[in-house]
Image (tube, helix red, strand yellow):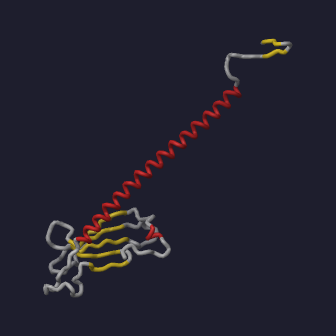
Amino acid sequence: KRQIGGMIFWSSTAGLTLVELMVVGAIGSMIIMALVAMTSRAFDVSRNQIEQGALTEKARIAIERMSDEIRNAKYIDCNIDSDTADLNEHWLVAGDAYSISLYSNVDDDVEAELVRYFINTGTPGEKKKLQRGVTQRGVGLCDFSGLEDVQVVSNKLDNFKNLNSINNVPIFH
């Protein structure tokens, strides 16, 4: 207790009051929550960028592989008359909005295989996938009636612009 000019002042140098401690605690908590939220968001953005980079690299590799197979496409002379202008003797076998089939040598032998890239657009709710099917040549020169070996190239097509548009813009033109 101190008296200055007729007024009495109570002063305590022992510490903070309970109200002051509560205010400091509340402000400190808000600052810590803001820092945690910013750090968490930064980690989310970083993880998303890493995932996007990995998907972009995977897509680049898939497109490069498709390009190589199309570039190495071969005509097949089914009736051995040295004329590949006959029906079914072109390198491009078939194609539509969501698939393309061609003859290309995709393994280490000298024979061309039937290669088909396609997107399953079947059941609603099922994840869309870009798939690659390879059929080895059978007994005859143009016999590709064997089993098709199908592999998933990518299963990340759910947000692919062409597949989700109202007009269903084709992938393979």
Q: Quadrant of residue 22?
A: top right
Give whichever of 123, 10 is nearer the camera.
10
Tell whether 1 sits left or right of 102: right
Q: Residue furthest right?
A: 6
Q: State the count of labels.
A: 0
Q: Quadrant of residue 52?
A: bottom left
Give whichever of 141, 124 is nearer the camera.
141
Q: Quadrant of residue 20?
A: top right
- The quadrant of the rendering that contains the N terminus is top right
Tell whether 75 sits left or right of 8: left
Location of residue 76 with respect to 52 vertically, above or below = below
Location of residue 11 with respect to 159 vertically, above or below = above
Q: Residue at x 61, y 37 (%)?
A: 30
Image location of residue 131, percent across then percent down: 33, 68
- The quadrant of the rendering that contains the C terminus is bottom left
Q: Residue at x 29, y 68 (%)?
A: 66
Q: Residue at x 22, y 71 (%)?
A: 72
Image location of residue 40, percent across then percent down: 50, 44
Image location of residue 23, percent across then percent down: 68, 31
Image location of residue 153, percent across then percent down: 32, 64
